[in-house]
Image (cartoon, grey):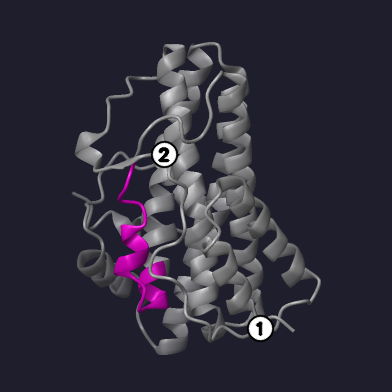
Amino acid sequence: MQTLGEAARAVLLTADPHDKRRAARGLARAWRRGQLEHRCDTPMPDQPAWPAEPELLAPNRMPKRGKGGSERGRIALLHALAHIEFVAIDLAVDLVGRFGGEFPRAFVDDWIGVAADEAMHFALLDRRLRQLGSHYGALPAHAELWEAAEATADDALARLAIVPMVLEARGLDVTPATVERFQAAGDEASAKILSRIYKDEIRHVSVGTLWFRQKCDEMGFNAVETWHALVKSRFRGSLKPPFNDSARHDAGLTQEFYAVIAS
């Protein structure tokens, strides 16, 4: 029987975006059907396989997108979001393959589900780009998303602290305003996609926060103090308001975590 680690590594080493999307959903099906052994002793790659396009640039070299009012601006914003969702597939799969053996099956259930969600989100955004005459890879994307995985490759707690509880939580802060911009431009199709993604991301942050708290309890750590220490030592950016306190609270990420160390 193939192991969970072997299957996760295969997804990470799939470069074509649509093949990766299908592979992630296939991983989820195989796990649900009991076709994978819960063993994660296969090394995960330092860097996933990605396609030649989009061209990856440093954030300060990225073209300005504007506010999304024009069709060109909306395409650029949708492309940026598609890239985030594409990399998020690898972030979720790497979390499972790298750390899944340290946790019970329920952890794998949750994060395999997140990976499948991210694959679906990517498919929705790429399809919308094609409806607008573009596609994923047509524009450059920034190259820093995987840095969070590299900075936390040695520590499951650090990975949970940074990826769902910082990066995905930031999506909760900015997505409602993005939805409103698409609605103001009359692009209800894109707004509906982002609204669907937003609801799923609340659950993803919730899953991250839940397992972070559980791991801290297991190790006898104070969850809030541990999160503060990990964010300060493992996250290169800063936590900037405004925060979507309501959505964060729904996800279990209460103000005691982020309010104290926000810049």
- Nearer to us: label 2 or label 1: 2
Q: Is residue 192 above or below residue 222?
A: above
**Horizontal and vertical percent position of residue 198:** 54, 40
Q: Which residue is drawn at 48% across and 29% down?
A: 78
**Horizontal and vertical percent position of residue 41:** 53, 86
Q: Residue at x 36, y 83 (%)?
A: 221
Q: Residue at x 38, y 52 (%)?
A: 167
Let me know if residue 100 is in the magenta part.
no
Upstream in sequence: badge 2 or badge 1? 1
**Horizontal and vertical percent position of residue 121:** 60, 42
Q: Residue at x 52, y 63 (%)?
A: 12
Q: In this view, does 185 lie above or below 14?
A: above
Q: Which residue is at the front of the view, 83 or 19? A: 19
Q: Quadrant of residue 254?
A: bottom left
Quadrant location of the N terminus in the rendered image? bottom right
Q: In this view, does 44 lie above or below 55?
A: below
Q: Please name the amino acid that badge 1 sits on.
A: His
Q: Which residue is at the front of the view, 250 or 95? A: 95
Instruction: Name the residue that disc number 2 marks.
Output: 54
**Horizontal and vertical percent position of residue 153:** 36, 73
Which element type, helix, strand or loop, lies under badge 2? Answer: loop
Q: The magenta stretch spans which residues? A: 142-159
Which element type, helix, strand or loop, lies under badge 1? Answer: loop
Instruction: Name the residue that disc number 1 marks.
Output: 38
> Is residue 252 among what the camera can see?
no
Count of numbered badges drawn on the protein: 2
Q: Please name the amino acid that badge 2 sits on.
A: Pro
